[in-house]
Image (spheres, rainbow, N blue to C red):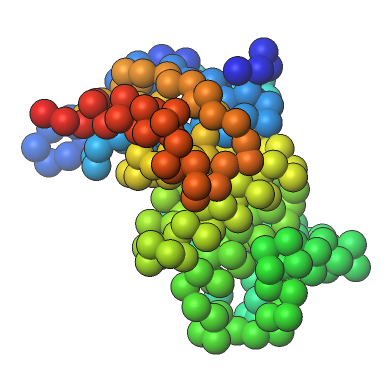
Amino acid sequence: MTATPLLQAQAVSVSYQTRRGSIDALSDVDLRVGEGEFVTILGPSGCGKSTLLKLAAGLLSPTRGRIEVAGTPVDGPNRDIGVAFQKPTLLPWRTVLDNVLLPSQTLGEDGPSARQRARELLEVVGLRDFADNYPNELSGGMQQRVGLARMLQRDPKLLLMDEPFAALDAMTREALTLELQRIWMRDRKSVLFITHSIPEAVLLSDRVLVMSARPGRVVEDYHVDIARPRSLATLAEPAFVAATDHLRRHFIS
């Protein structure tokens, strides 16, 4: 792990008030994501994975503890952070190009350079020829590629990704997983990625943070010692099988 943490959470806890009392979602979570590091959060449903990502994005505030990006406390959305959720939530009345441009237009930066970057990103994700199409003319995998391009439009330092491929079929999911690795190796952004898939976590990550059941806490920080670039053939390598077997033990009762 690199010495400089771009994202750091210190003793972060989150509690929700309900009609039946208080529910603890996270308990004393510590994590670090270094510059250029790909870190995945792996854990059971309801353990607070998405809550932790929303804290990092500035969409929620912790009940206790502190969370920082580049040494600055997170107190709201940050232009240096790009976020991708399970569904790309594209605006159906805007073309693919205009959907990618949305972050720049929101900030009043819809100039020639922004449009050029949007077109370059569509090239990167393999959608150069679909810039003038509308979302309903694209497959689910293509829509998710548009979401990836939109996330990268403002050239953020940190990418937060909440199960972005979970709703896709297996073959499309594998293809986009490898596509994400390729983009990450090109740009070396810092990434905090959430998944329920142990193979996906190992294939993509430098480190995997394993979380307990609610209230979520980090129970292991696992280093993935497998050379890059990784491919589908990597899934059959002994080191990959050993890593997935090790992580799976956390979820076998």
Please identify the quadrant where the N terminus is shown.
Answer: top right
Q: Nearer the viewer, residue 58 or 119?
A: 119
Please identify the quadrant where the C terminus is shown.
Answer: top left
Residue 158 % position (x, y): 64, 38
Splitting the image into 4 quarters, where does residue 184 fall?
top right
Residue drawn at point x = 63 percent, y = 80 percent: 94
Residue 185 shown left or right of residue 220 in the figure: right
Q: Is residue 33 above or below residue 200?
A: above
Splitting the image into 4 quarters, where does residue 52 fall?
top left
Furthest-right residue in view? 112
Q: Nearer the viewer, residue 148 or 176?
A: 176
Q: Nearer the viewer, residue 81 or 140?
A: 140
**Is residue 55 visible to the viewer in this orientation of the structure?**
no
Q: Nearer the viewer, residue 154 or 180?
A: 180
Q: Is residue 65 above or below residue 234?
A: above
Total count of labels: 0
Residue 61 shown left or right of residue 111 in the figure: left
Residue drawn at point x = 86 percent, y = 66 percent: 116
Residue 71 % position (x, y): 66, 20
Residue 8 % position (x, y): 55, 21
Residue drawn at point x = 68 percent, y = 73 percent: 127
Q: Is residue 250 above or below residue 164?
A: above
Residue drawn at point x = 60 percent, y = 84 percent: 134
Residue 176 % position (x, y): 53, 58
Residue 62 shown left or right of residue 149 in the figure: left
**Is residue 222 visible to the viewer in this orientation of the structure?**
yes
